[in-house]
Amino acid sequence: MLHTLETVQRRERIAGQWKESAETSSWYWATSFPQRQLPTRELWQAGHGRWDIENGCFNTASTHWGLDHAFKHHPTAIVNFVLTLFLAFILLQCFWQRNLKPPLRDRFTLIGLAAELYLGLARPLRARARAP
């Protein structure tokens, strides 16, 4: 068990004035690894890395990608949906991080890029549906 107290200096603009404040967080990290196998600093880094995954992946997937909705209730369908969703999310994130040049990354957020790709896929379908 590791308990850390972390203080971060925040600077924000409120009513045109810069305000500085200190924000202290208390974290508890639990592991089954012995300390000789996972030193304190590495446990701390792993804990924060896991928290980044929680915020960056699961929060985004549930907020913008429909992870919080069960389209089918059969266990196999749920697993297949979640795995497909994660695969699409990871591929899109890899494309955004490794393939887009910095000026385009500045123009598009990850969600914005997903919306553009969706519109690109939907346009040909709508055009075919209207064709005689």
Image (cartoon, grey):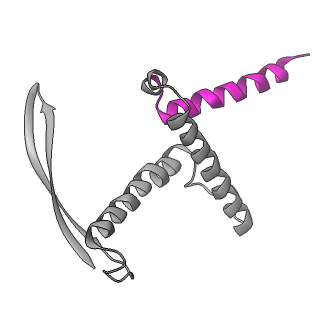
Count of numbered circles in the view: 0
Name the residue at the front extreme: 36
Q: Is residue 104 left or right of residue 80?
A: left
* Residue nearer the viewer, 29 or 20: 29
* Residue nearer the viewer, 96 or 108: 96
Residue 9 in magenta stretch? no
Q: Is residue 50 above or below residue 33?
A: above
The N terminus lies in quadrant: bottom left
For the stretch drawn in magenta, what is the main secondary structure? helix
Identity of the residue drawn at 64% across and 50% down: 87
Residue 83's x, y, as percent?
Answer: 65, 57
Q: Is residue 32 above or below residue 74?
A: below
Q: Is residue 118 above or below residue 82?
A: above
Residue 14's x, y, as percent?
Answer: 13, 32
Q: Is residue 7 left or right of residue 116?
A: left
Residue 117 in magenta stretch? yes
The C terminus lies in quadrant: top right
Q: Is residue 74 left or right of residue 89?
A: right
Q: Is residue 94 above or below residue 4?
A: above
Name the residue at the right extreme: 132
Residue 70's x, y, as percent?
Answer: 63, 58
Identity of the residue drawn at 39% across and 82% down: 32
Residue 71's x, y, as percent?
Answer: 68, 55
Q: Is residue 92 left or right of residue 16?
A: right
* Residue nearer the viewer, 104 or 65: 104
Identity of the residue drawn at 78% across and 26% down: 125
* Residues in magenta, as a range: 107-131
